[in-house]
Image: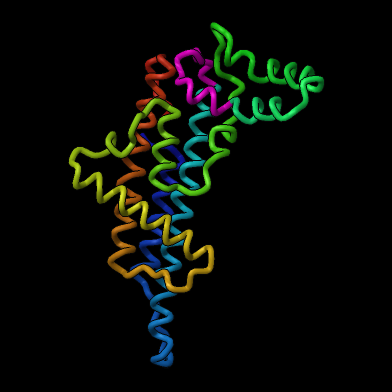
Amino acid sequence: MTSKALLNLLAGVDEVQALRSEFPVPKGIPSGYMALAAKAHGRSCVVLLSSHLDRYVYAVNEEAIDWINRAQCDIARFPDEFLLQHSKGAVDSIAARSWERRAESLREFIAVHGELWSPGGVSGSLNHAELLTWMRAPKPESLQRFYRLYGVENIFQAVTRGSATRAALYLGIRELVEKRNNIAHGDFETQALPTDVTRYLAAVQKFAVSADNRLSLAIRRLVGQGISPW
């Protein structure tokens, strides 16, 4: 079984693969524009693929939290890092207020977050958006931080066996996201050769398929009900 988020990502990978393999060469195009067209084509593949990976992380997190809320599980089984991140925005908002103005905020905090921090509290009111307020791009470090929220200490170790495979996967995603960020910030020199795009496609697909299964297993352990979200 796979998550709906993964199915959408794989459709996105197919989209980029089609774009990569069907590079258009219009008849009569001036030779001086060929290099520019090839460069733009590679840059487009990078931006599109990175966007699909970015969307996958948000979508699989939302899918996971929706399922956990329906499962009504013991929230004490979840890592402190998960609970702290979920409550961070509310706590920071309280801390930013003067002492005299914190009473109402504390009441609101208890109403929304109190059960999550109480013995015997169960899931049901988790907000998926709170878990990813810090994320800006699916860099390897950010991916590791995301999966740690669900108890997976190092997602790249969890989805690979050999160090060489792990390094290639990590580097491929890092390059993809860095190039996407450079392009988004107006760096005209950044480009991706066809071989680069092929590596990035392989890295994203390998990571997502393996990580999707690992997240499902991690959530199953956290919930402790012998059932998986997908």
Q: Position of residue 194 (x, y in %)?
A: 31, 69
- Asked whether 79 falls inside the magenta stretch, the response is yes
**Which image quadrant for residue 26?**
bottom left
Q: Answer with left or right where residue 105 lies relative to residue 192.
A: right
Q: Is residue 136 left or right of residue 206?
A: right
Q: Foreground residue, 24 or 92?
A: 92
In the rendered image, the quadrant that contains the N terminus is top left
Residue drawn at the location 41% of the way across and 24% of the way down: 219
* Residue furthest out toward the front: 99
Q: Is residue 206 left or right of 129 when viewed as pictured?
A: left
Q: Residue at x 35, y 38 (%)?
A: 211
Residue pictured at 35% horizontal, 29% vertical: 153
The spot of residue 109 in percent (x, y) is: 69, 20
Q: Which residues are magenta?
A: 70-86
Q: Quadrant of residue 144?
A: top left
Q: How is the image coloured?
A: rainbow
